[in-house]
Image: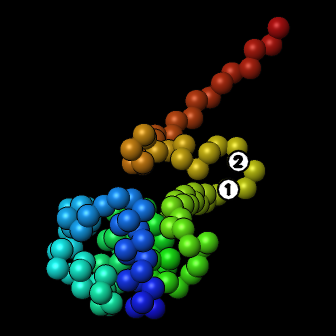
Amino acid sequence: MEGKMKLRLEELRNKLGLSRRDVHEATGISMNTLLHYEKGGTPSIGQVENIAKAYNINPAWLLGWIDEGQQPQPLETVVEKIIYVEKEGCRLPPYWNNDNNGRIIKWKESRRAFQRRTI
């Protein structure tokens, strides 16, 4: 695993045409530490995540845990929306009582008596 991290970090830098200084500025990891990683040192999970986020790659690829055709793949963002239904048969969306910022609006219920007209 350590050897793959070393090779993949170098591959990433070479493919993107970056120097260690560029990686340092994008990730906040010191240049000496980056050199240590490229010579086979083991980074912490936090450091791997910093590099992966900065260059939009999969951290598992960077560590050598997965092989994706020897190419760094961009991460995909998955967005889920969970909808809670309070009453079945109601056609109101679940956010009917929220304003644009997601805060709940306080509603007052009023009931008016309607008279039927007979013609």
- Amino acid at the residue labelled 2: Cys
Q: In this view, does 104 lie to the left or right of 79?
A: left
Residue 19: image quadrant is bottom left
Q: Relative to residue 112, is residue 19 depicted above or below?
A: below
Could you say where residue 107 lies in the image, as x and y percent from the top left? 45, 41
Q: Relative to residue 95, is residue 48 depicted above or below?
A: below
Q: In this view, does 44 lie to the left or right of 15?
A: left
Q: Mark 1 points at which residue?
A: 87
Q: Nearer the viewer, residue 97 or 7?
A: 7
Could you say where residue 26 lies in the image, as x and y percent from the top left? 25, 61
Q: Distance between the residues labelled 2 and 1?
A: 6 Å
Residue 39: image quadrant is bottom left
Instruction: Answer whether labels 2 and 1 touch (C-beta < 8 Å).
Output: yes
Tally the numbered discs: 2
Q: What element carries label 2?
A: loop
Q: What element carries label 1?
A: loop
Residue at x 38% of width, y 75% of height = 9
- Amino acid at the residue labelled 1: Lys
Could you say where residue 114 lies in the image, as x and y percent from the top left? 66, 24
Q: Name the residue under label 2.
A: 90
Residue 53 at least partly seen:
no
Residue at x 61% of width, y 72% of height = 69
